[in-house]
């Protein structure tokens, strides 16, 4: 459930009427989480609360978006909510993996909050294993999108104008039958469950994802967040080719520790 902070910075309680909820899936390469980091840091979003759940591995750490020594010691936990009312945007950042068999309870709690807080739509940033693409998915851009039927009515035409590519369905029984097609997002974590549940509950949801591999996924995060920006226009693009542009995004201070400390000189 949503627990508001005891300080200002956003709508009262959990009322985000008309807001877009942006969140990551905990997926391959943590690309969605890194992309959400860029949004929070660049827009200087205010923390307005926490999403209290027993479905995520407990975690506590320092402020990942610290800009000075004064705010570097603020604590952060596994699921926090940020807001920028001027853009009608609320962000749920997830910082730890799911506990086994907790996907569905988390999904139910999240979608219940979405309805209760009156968010207009949900945008999930995700990723999928590049090595598990089928022949059709190997062609063209590594970026894909999905829209629930309710959101398709509202923005489907815009996606066509942007020349975006919808996530393809793949054969349920490869090599045996190509007639039965299913949605398959390997490495996507909770993405598929969230999307299918939103379809059945009439919630407006978009999934934006990138095919990638584990490793240094910072470049993937920039590509994905620029893909998002093509649609939502969160920041002014400084390049004609938005998927190559990264200078408009502010890298959070915590990224200095993504790969740990350097090698100690004593080793040499």
Image (cartoon, rainbow, N blue to C red):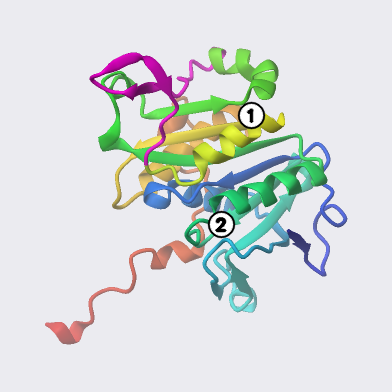
**Residue at 54% across / 72% down in the picture?**
59
Q: Between 20 and 40, which is closer to the camera in this rendering?
A: 20
Secondary structure at badge 2 equals strand
Q: Nearer the viewer, mark 2 or mark 1?
A: 1
Residue depicted at 36% across the width and 29% down the height: 142
Q: Nearer the viewer, residue 246 or 52?
A: 52
For the residues labelled 2 and 1, the Cα–Cα distance comes to: 22 Å
Which residue, as the protein is rendered here, is positioned at the far right? 12
* Residue 11 percent location from the top left of the image: 84, 52
Residue assigned mark 1:
199
Instruction: Give the quadrant of the C terminus.
Output: bottom left
Q: Which range of residues does the magenta coloring cover?
A: 161-186
**Residue 180 magenta-highlighted:** yes
* Residue 261 painted magenta: no
Describe residue 61's horizontal placement relative to residue 1 as left or right: left
Specify whether 224 is left or right of 148: left
């Amino acid at each position: 459930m949503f627990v508001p902070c005891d300080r200002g910075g956003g709508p009262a309680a959990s009322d985000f009427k008309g807001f877009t909820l942006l969140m990551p899936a905990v997926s391959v390469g943590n690309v969605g989480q890194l992309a959400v980091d860029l949004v929070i840091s660049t827009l200087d979003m205010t923390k307005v609360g926490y999403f209290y759940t027993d479905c995520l591995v407990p975690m506590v750490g320092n402020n990942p978006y610290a800009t000075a020594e004064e705010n570097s010691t603020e604590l952060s936990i596994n699921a926090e909510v940020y807001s920028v009312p001027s853009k009608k945007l609320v962000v749920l950042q997830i910082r730890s993996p799911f506990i086994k068999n907790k996907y569905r309870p988390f999904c139910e709690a999240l979608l219940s909050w979405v309805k209760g807080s009156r968010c207009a739509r949900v945008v999930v940033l995700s990723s999928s294993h590049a090595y598990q693409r089928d022949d059709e998915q190997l062609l063209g851009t590594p970026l894909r999108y999905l829209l629930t039927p309710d959101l398709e009515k509202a923005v489907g035409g815009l996606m066509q104008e942007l020349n975006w590519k919808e996530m393809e369905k793949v054969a349920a029984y490869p090599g045996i039958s190509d007639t039965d097609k299913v949605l398959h997002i390997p490495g996507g974590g909770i993405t598929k469950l969230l999307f299918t549940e939103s379809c059945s509950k009439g919630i407006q949801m978009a999934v934006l994802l990138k095919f990638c591999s584990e490793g240094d996924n910072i470049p993937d995060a920039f590509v994905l967040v620029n893909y998002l920006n093509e649609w939502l226009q969160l920041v002014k693009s400084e390049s004609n080719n938005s998927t190559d542009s990264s200078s408009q995004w502010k890298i959070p201070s915590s990224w200095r520790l993504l790969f740990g400390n350097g090698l100690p000189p004593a080793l040499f």
